[in-house]
Amino acid sequence: MKKVFLGFIACTFLAIFACSDEFTTNPSPNGQDLESFFLSESNVEQALIGVYDIMQLTYGRDWHSAFLVKLLPGDDANAAGGNSADQQQLQDIDDYTAVASSNASITVMWNTFYQAIALSNLIIENMENSTLPNRERVSAEAKFMRAWCHFELTTMFGDIPLRNTVPSGAEDFGIPKSPRADVYAQIESDLLDAMSGLPNRAGIADNFRVSNGVAEALLGKVLVFQEKYSEAIPHFQNVIGGGEFDLEPNIDNVWSIDKEFGMESLFEIGYISTFGYNWDGNVAWGGRTESNLHIQLMGPRGDGIFGLDGTGLINGWGFNLPTAKLLTAFDTAGDVTRKAATVMTEAELIAAGGSVDQSAAPGGSVWDYEGGIRIKYATKAEDTSPGGVRELNYSTNFRLFRYAEVLLLAAEAYNKSSQDGSARTELNKIRNRAGLADIDSSISGNDLFEAIVDEKYLELAHEGQRFWDLVRWGKAATELAGTGYSAKNDLFPIPITEIEKNSELTLDDQNPGY
């Protein structure tokens, strides 16, 4: 079931929490006093849905989504688009060389994550002394969301302002950056509270909302990112043995709209197609939409360039093309089934009945094209859009956290804890679903770790994990050699707007190299 995420949220609460020109204002929420607002159980639920709404915006905001910002530094995707200057801020992230503290996409992502944190804080504070029957679950769910956002931010920016309270006014907004270790400690605390306060998935009526198993899986991931492998293992064991989640038997179904909020999805951002958006002004371009504009944005470009007969795909705007390195990696692994659900080479496209005519592109060649198109999160005819213009009404959800990733994280934790037999067990679940044989039982130690690295590259391609894994593994310099990458790109720059408006930050607090 798709959910319509309510538009109640932030505008009323959140102007003071993001680095924006509206920071100094503190409007009342639709004229209702905050203290009385949170006395109503239904209002509290509405506020919590508002956090999900902000997350929908964070990952799906036209040209400035966290989905693309996280993805593009990796070696699995190119920015592409119409030319080298199409959405320059995204091209800069993809090419490493011109990323600046004024980058619009990075700034928007930073702000919207902090908006979600701000509303979560508001909910948490108002639940502390509440007598409402849903207070514990609501607080736990808000703490999960706060933990998720802080984790995303510290992964991409390192030391960050750790915001766990609601500022009483502009004078309280300024706080310094906290060391990443302190951010992790808060994330762990929030997730432990979320685990104890959230129900099992079976006890949740709204399928888009998180369960205690999701919180525990995320805690395991956070521990792995800190190299606390032995501490992570019990949490992964609980999730794997808990029965809440499993792999979709058919990998083709993982990203199908018919399998949204399915058995493999731990945390998923929902979109719908029923608003009937069109070009006459009812689409909130640059703002909030309930459809997923990125599906159209990432479809193979039309204009006579990519003919898609026989593929079941529809032309889009040409962003997010696969790299030749990724295409080769699938072939080297002999990975046919998973490859077909993820990418398609030019030869495969032509064999299906399609075509490629690079001469139709500006300048006679397709920018950032390296011989393939993307199938994962593709413009598929199955995604029907009643009313409106198809290009503006795709409803494909973003799967932000999948059970497959949990298995790969568990395999990594086992391997790093010298439990290679258990690591192979979890790795083989992923391989077998992809139609591959078990990994040789003699492979162990660092060789097994490299196999896990390779498997994760293929399984999570185009999902925004690759670059950040390369950074934490110390592999970025090797894997990205010759691309323009340098060590400064391990972190994004703190947005200049944050430094200007946060009285406790100066230019000296900027990340190295920016």
Image (spheres, grey):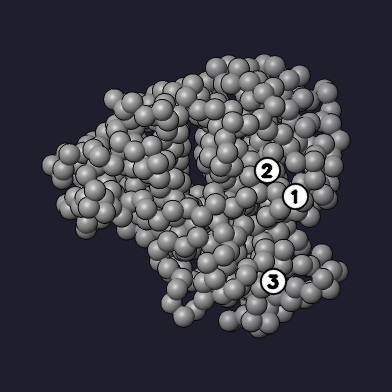
**Nearer to us in this view, 50 or 475:** 50
- Above or below 128: residue 104: below
- Above or below 507: residue 484: below
Q: Earlier in the sequence, mark 1 or mark 2?
A: 1
Residue at the spot x=84%, y=42% of the render? 435
**Element at label 3:** loop
Residue that badge 1 annotates: 253
Q: Quadrant of residue 374?
A: bottom right
Q: Given the image, on which type of amino acid does mark 1 rest?
A: Asn
In the figure, is residue 509 to the left or right of 319?
Answer: left
Circle 1 packing at 10 Å, graded few (<14), some (14-19), many (20+), is some
Residue at the spot x=84%, y=69% of the render? 352
Whole-number angstrom distance, CA of label 1 to CA of label 3:
18 Å
Residue that badge 3 annotates: 314
Residue at the spot x=72%, y=63% of the render? 382
* Cβ atoms at labels 1 and 2 below 8 Å apart: yes
Residue at the spot x=49%, y=79% of the render? 279
Residue 55, visible in the rendered structure: yes
Whole-number angstrom distance, CA of label 1 to CA of label 2:
9 Å
Q: Given the image, on which type of amino acid does mark 3 rest?
A: Ile
Q: Which disc number belongs to residue 262?
A: 2
